[in-house]
Amino acid sequence: MSSNSITFANGVLMPLIGLGTYQIHSKEAIYKVLEAGLASGYRLIDTASGYRNEEHIGAALRDLLPKFGLKREDLFITSKIGPSSAGNHASVVSCCQASLQHLGTTYLDLLLIHWPGLHKIAGEDPRNKAGRLVTWSALQDLYRSGVTRAIGVSNYETRHCREILDSGIVPHVNQVELHPHYPQESLLEFCREHGIAVQAYCSLGSRDHKDKLLQDPAVLSVTESCAASPAQVLLVWALQQNIGVLPKSTNTDHIAANIAARDLVLSKEQFSLINSIQTRYKYAWDPKNIY
C-alpha cells in the first residue's frame, strides 16, 4: 500500500483499516478485542450510539492506552447518531454528548449519521428528508464547535448525498456496505467526484450468510495464487482502491491477520479476477426505500 490512511477534504487523516465493534456487547469481549487490536497496530475504533458498547470501549481505553504507551490523540474514534436521535437538533447534540461521556473523551474524530431514515417513520414519508437536513445541520454545528474533527454519513445512497452537497460542509465520509458482491461502482464514483471518502463495512460478508463471500470461487482462486487468506484478499481489494475497511472479529488471530492485509498487494490480474465476479448480494440493511 502506498499509504495507510485516507486524507479528508479538511486535511484530517483517517486510518484505512479499523476495528469494527458492531454486535460486540460484553465488557470482556470489548476489552479483548481492543487489546488485541492495539497490539496489532489498529488505531481506528468504529462504534455507534446504537451499538451499546461505548461505555465498555471507554473503560477499556482507560486501561489500555497507558498499557501500550498511547494517548487519546493516537487514536481515531468514530461514533454515529442513530435514527432515534436524528431529526431534532437538541437530540443530536445530546446523543453526541452521551457518546463523549461513555467513551471518556472530549472529542470524536468522526461523527456520522447512521441511517438516512428516522425511527419508526415509513421509508416514503417526507419527514425522513426533512430530518436528514436537520441532523446534518446539527452535525455541522458540532464540527464547527470542535466536538468532532470530521463529519459524515452512513448508508447514504447518491440521492441522499446530493441533498446536502450545497448545505455548507460536504460530508467527509460515506460509510456503506461495499464488497465484490456489492461493489457500488456508481456511488463510489460519485463520492470520489465530490471529495467524499468511502469506508466499507461487511467487507467479508455476514455471519448470517456464512462464507458466501469468503468462499466465492474467484476469491479462492486469488487466495491460492498469493498466499493470503480469503479475508485478506477481500480487504486488500478495497484498500487498493483507497476504500477504508472495518473488519470485525473477536478472534485475536483474525484481528492480527486482518490488519496485515494492508501490507499485501494484488496484481492487476488478481484484481481483475475479483472485479469479474458477477454475483450480486447485499448482506445488510438496504436504504433504497428510504426517501
Image (tube, rainbow, N blue to C red):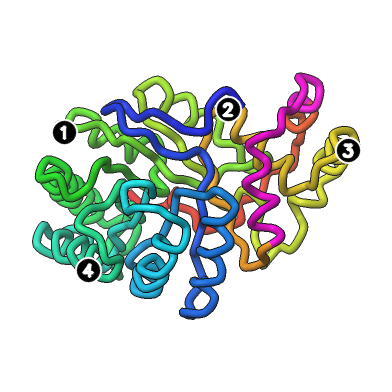
| x 61%, y 56%: residue | 283
Which class describes the residues within 10 Å of circle 3: few (<14), some (14-19), or many (20+)?
some
Which class describes the residues within 10 Å of circle 2: few (<14), some (14-19), or many (20+)?
few
**Earlier residue among tags 1 and 2:** 1
Residue 110 seen:
no
Nearer to us in this view, 200 or 231: 231
**Earlier residue among tags 4 and 2:** 4
**Residue beneath label 4, please?**
101
**Residue beneath label 1, please?**
167
With respect to residue 204, does 162 lie above or below? Answer: above
Instruction: Give the foreground label among 1 and 2.
Output: 2
Cα distance in 3D space between marks 1 and 4: 29 Å
Helix, strand or loop for disc 3? helix
**Residue beneath label 3, please?**
221
In the image: residue 150, left or right of residue 63? left
| x 43%, y 24%: residue | 192
Residue 76 seen:
yes
Q: Which residues are magenta?
A: 253-272
**Earlier residue among tags 3 and 2:** 3
Cα distance in 3D space between marks 3 and 2: 20 Å
- In the image, which disc is placed on residue 233? none
Identity, as a three-letter code, of the amino acid under mark 4: Gln
Identity, as a three-letter code, of the amino acid under mark 3: Ser
Cα distance in 3D space between marks 4 and 3: 47 Å
Helix, strand or loop for disc 1? loop
| x 61%, y 35%: residue | 238
